[in-house]
Amino acid sequence: MPFNSFQFVAFFFIVYCFYLLSSHKWQNRLLLAASCFFYGSWDWRFLFLIFTSITIDYFCGLKIHGSDDENVKKRFLILSILVNLSILGFFKYFNFFISNFTGLIDYFGLSIQPRTLNIVLPVGISFYTLKTLSYTFDVYTDKIKPARSYSDYALFVIFFPLLLAGPIMRAGELLPQISSKRKLRLDEIGEGCYFIFWGLFQKIFIADNLAKVVDPVFNSSAPYDCTKIILALYAFAFQIYCDFAGYSNMARGLGKCMGFDIMVNFNFPYFSTNPQEFWARWHISLSAWFRDYLYIPISFSKREWGKWGVIFALMITFIICGVWHGAAWTFVLWGAYQGFLLVIYQLFKTAPIKMPILENAFFKKIWYFSRMFFFFQLISIGWLFFRVKSFSQALQMLRSLAGFLSNLQFDLLSRAMLIDLVFFTIVLVIVEYFQHARKDLTILLKAPFPVKLFVFMALFYLLVIFGEFGTKEFIYSQF
Amino acid sequence: MLRIFGVEFSHLGGKYFIHFISFFAAVVILVCLFFFSRKQLRSSLQKGISVLIVVMVLRLFLLYNPFIWRFYKNSLTEKEVGWLNRDVLRIEYYKYFRYFFCLSKYCILGSSQVGYVFPPGLLGDAQVFTMSGLSPLGYLGLKDYFRFDRPEYIVLFISDLDMARFPDQAYLRTSLTGGFDLLKIFPRIFENKAFREKYSTKKLDFFARFIFAQIFPEWKFSFVFKGFLNKLKGYNYELKEVTNIELADVPAEVSLKEQLKNLTENHFEEPIPANLILLEEFVSFCYLNKIKVIILEGQYNPLAYTEKNMQLEKSVRNGITKLLLSYPNLVYIPREKLYQFTESDYLGGYHVNFQAAQRFLISFAGVYSDYCKD
Amino acid sequence: MVSERLKKVILKVLKLGDFDLQGSTKAFQVPGWDSLSHVSILSAIEKEYRIRFKISEVLSLNNLEDLQLLVNKKVENAV
C-alpha cells in the first residue's frame, strides 16, 4: 500500500496507537510485524526473498567479525555480495539481459527463441539490497560491529517507512536507534506530522498534477513540438523531485513520529550550480552509497592513473548508478551523461573566472542565479534520457530540440502547459527559497501564528482541491 | 423586487437558505464571542478557535451562500467543469430558493433523454427536471426537494440505460444532506453477490470518497476551482477540448455509430439489482409522502438494441413489476402500451425530435386514465 | 596527534595555505576535501611515506587521528 492511500492511513493509525502504548522491546516487535505485513501486502512471496537476504547477511556479518583470518572474512563478504546481487540481478535484469543477448545473436545472423520470464519485480529490492550490502561492507572494514540480535537486524532492513524508496540508511546510523530506547517528544511528533504533510503535498498536489503535463508528451510519438518538450522536461524535473522528495519527507516524518531520526535525503538540489554540488544534494543517501562503496574503491585502485583514474571511476560509478535506476539503455545513457557532466566539471572547475564586476553583491547574486539556471537546463536534458521510453524516442526528441529556434511555437496547448507548470510549482519554489536562505527545513513551523495559519490553510486547501487522489504510484517504487 | 448581487431577494427561502442564514449567524456570533473573550482564553485555545473561524468564514464565503453560486453558475461552462458538474452547479444555486422544484401537479424526472421526450412547451401543468445520466441514485439525491413542494405525481422514464450501469456517487452531490441519510442503503446494495464481485474494488473507494466529501465540501466542490484553473488555461486536458475554439462539425453518421457502440458496451446485469434497491427506496419515500409514481418503460434508438439489451430490458421489467405488489402508489406502463419510437425519430442514440415527442405524449394521454384513477 | 609532516602533505594537495587540522577533524570539514580529492590526498601520503594502503583500511577511516595511526602502523611495518 503506497503512502498516499486510505489503506496506509488506516494501517499507520493502528500501528501508531499500539506503538505509543508499548515498551521498547514490544515497539520493535510491533514494528517488525507491521513492516512484514506492509511488505507482504504487495505479495507475500516477496517476504521470502527479503528474509533470505536478511538471514544470509546477518549470518555473514557475524562470521566476518568473528574471524581473524583475512581469507575467511573475504569469503563471507563475497558470499553476501553474490547472494544479494544475484537476487537483484535475476529479478531486475534477467529480461533485459535476455533481450539484449538475443539481439546480439540476431545481429550475427543466428536466431534463438528466448524465454523471457514473466518476472515480477519485488518492491524496493534495489533499495534494500544496497542497504544490506552496506552492512556487510561496513562490518568487513570494521566500521561497525555486527548486529547481535536477529530481529533488530531484520527490522533495520525491512523498516517500513524506508522500505519502498526511503533513504538508504547505514547500519551505523539506524541500528543503534533500533537497539536503544527512543524518546518521544511532542514537538518532535509535531515536526513529524509537518514532514508527512509537506511530503503528501509534494506528492499529491505537485508531482501527480505535473504528471498530467508530462505524460501526454512522452506517451505520444514523433514529430515532437520543441516548446512542448521543453515544458514537459521542466515539469518532469519538478515531478520527479517532488515525487521522490515527497516520499522521503513522508518517510522522515513517519520516523520522527516514532522517535527515529531519519536522514535528510534531498537538500534543495535545484539550487545547485554544478554537478558535484547537485549530487551532494540529490538523493543524498544513494549518492553517498555510490561514493563510499563504488567510487572511492575504484578511484583508489586506479590512483596511479592520476586524472584518468578519477575520470574512469566517475564514469563507471555513474553508469552503474544509471543501471541501478532501471534495466534499460536509456538509464545507462542517463548515468553516462551525469558522469560526463561531472568529468567536465572536474577538469574545468579550477579554471578561474575572475571578473571584477562580481565583487558587487548584486551582480554576484545575478551570476549565482544564472549559473543555477544554466545548470538546471543541463539537468533537464538529463531527465530527457531518464523519462523517454526508448532510445529512438530520445533521438527524435533531441533532434526536435536541436532545431529549437526554427520550430518554437507557442500554441494554446503550450500556454496551458505553462500555466499548469507555474501554478503547481510556484508554492514549492517560494517555500524552498526561504527554506534554503535560512538553511532550515522547518521555517514554516517557526513562523508567527498568523503566517503559519495562512500558509497551512493555503497548502491544505490546495491539496484538498487540486490534489490527485487516484493512486498514482511513486516513480521510484519501480526501482 | 429587491435584488442583492443579482439574486432575487423574494425568491430566497427554503430549508437550505435557512441553513445558510443560521450558519452565517453562527459565524458572526462565534467571531464576536472570540474577540470579546480573547484575553481570558489560553493561547492554544485561541489558536484552535481562530483556525475554526477561518475555516468557517472561508466555507461561508466560497461554498455556502447563494451569491457565490450564482457567480459560479454564470462563469463556468460545460467545457470547463464537465457536463455533470454543470448540472450540479445549477442545482447548487437553486437550493437557496423556495420556488424551484415542482410547483406543478406533475414532476418529470430523468436524464437528458427525458428532456427530449417531454420537451418544454408541450406540457401544461408539469415541470421537467433533467440531469445528464440521472439514475435511481440521483432520484434519491433529489428526494428532499420534494418534501417542501410536493407534486402529486412523479413521472419516470426508465430503461436499462438507467438501470444497467454502476450508480455513480457523483449524483449525491445534489442531495441536501450530502447523501448521509442514504448510508443505510449502501450495505444492502453490496450484499448482492454478483454486484459485489464485479464492483468490490470500488467499495472502499466509494465509502472513503463519500466520507471525505461529507467532511470536506472543499473537495466535493473542487471541480469549481479546477474549472477556474481550466478557464485560465483555456484548455481542459480531461475533456480534451479547447474552450475558445468551436468544435468542428462531426458528420451525423459517425457520431451516431460511436454513440451506439458506447450504449451496449457499458450496460451490465450486475448493477440492476442494486439500482432496483435504490429505486424501491425512492418509491417508498414517495409512498410515505403521498406522492404517486408513474414509471414509463424507457426506450432508446432501436439500432442500438442487441441480444444483451433485450436480456437486460427483461430484468428491469421484472424488477419493477415486483415493486408493484408492495407499493400501491406505483404505476408501471410498459412500452407496448405507448408509442414505440422508430429510427427516424432519433437525433442520435437517445434524443428524439419534437414530432416524435408529441406522438408519445398523445399515446401516454390515451392510456393515462387506465392506469391513474384521479 | 597529527604530525606536521602529514599536515603539510594534506594542505599541499588541497592548495590550502593554513588550516587547523586536529585529530578529531573529519575529511568533509576541511575545505576542498571531497570524494574527488580524497584519493589524491591518500595517494600523495603514500608517495610521501613510501607506503601502500589497502582499500579496506582506507574505508574504515573516520577522522585524521585514524589516518595518522594508520600511517604510523604502515611505516612501522615497512621498516
Image: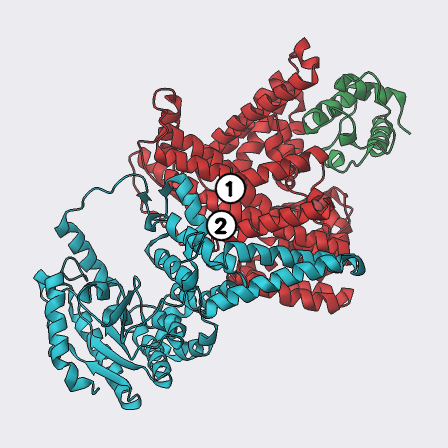
Residue located at (71% from left, 46% from top): A73
Residue B86 image-quadrant placement: bottom left
Name the element at disc 1.
Answer: helix
Q: Are marks 1 and 2 in contact (CB under 8 Å)?
A: yes
Whether residue A4 is visible: no
| Residue picked out by circle 2 | A466
Secondary structure of the residue carrying tag 2 is helix
Q: Earlier in the sequence, mark 1 or mark 2?
A: 1
Q: Chain B in the picture: what colour?
A: cyan
Can you give x and y, in whole percent of width and height, for residue A445 in the image? 71, 47
Q: Chain of mark 2?
A: A
Instruction: From this view, report whether residue A396 is shown above or below residue A323.
Output: above
* Of residues B373 and A317, the one drawn nearer to the viewer in this rendering: B373
Q: Are marks 1 and 2 on the same chain?
A: yes
By what rule are the colours in the image chosen? by chain
Amino acid type, label 2: Phe
Q: Is residue B11 left or right of residue B41?
A: left
The crowd level at tag 2 (other Cα within 10 Å; few <14, some 14-19, many 20+) is many
Chain C shade in the render: green
Which residue is denoted by mark 1 in the rendering?
A: A424
Mark-to-mark CA distance, 1 and 2? 9 Å
In depth, the one of B38 and B259 nearer the eye is: B38
Picture layout, residue A308 above or below residue A145: above
Q: Position of residue A1 (x, y in %)?
A: 53, 60
Q: Amino acid at mark 1?
A: Phe
Q: Colour of chain A?
A: red
Q: Residue at x 74, y 45 (%)?
A: A446
In the image, residue A385 lies at what x, y percent? Answer: 45, 33
The residue lying toward the viewer, choosing from A113 and B43, is: B43
Q: Which residue lies at the image location 16% right of the left edge and 55% below the top edge? A: B256
Where residue B11 appears, x then y in whole percent?
40, 63
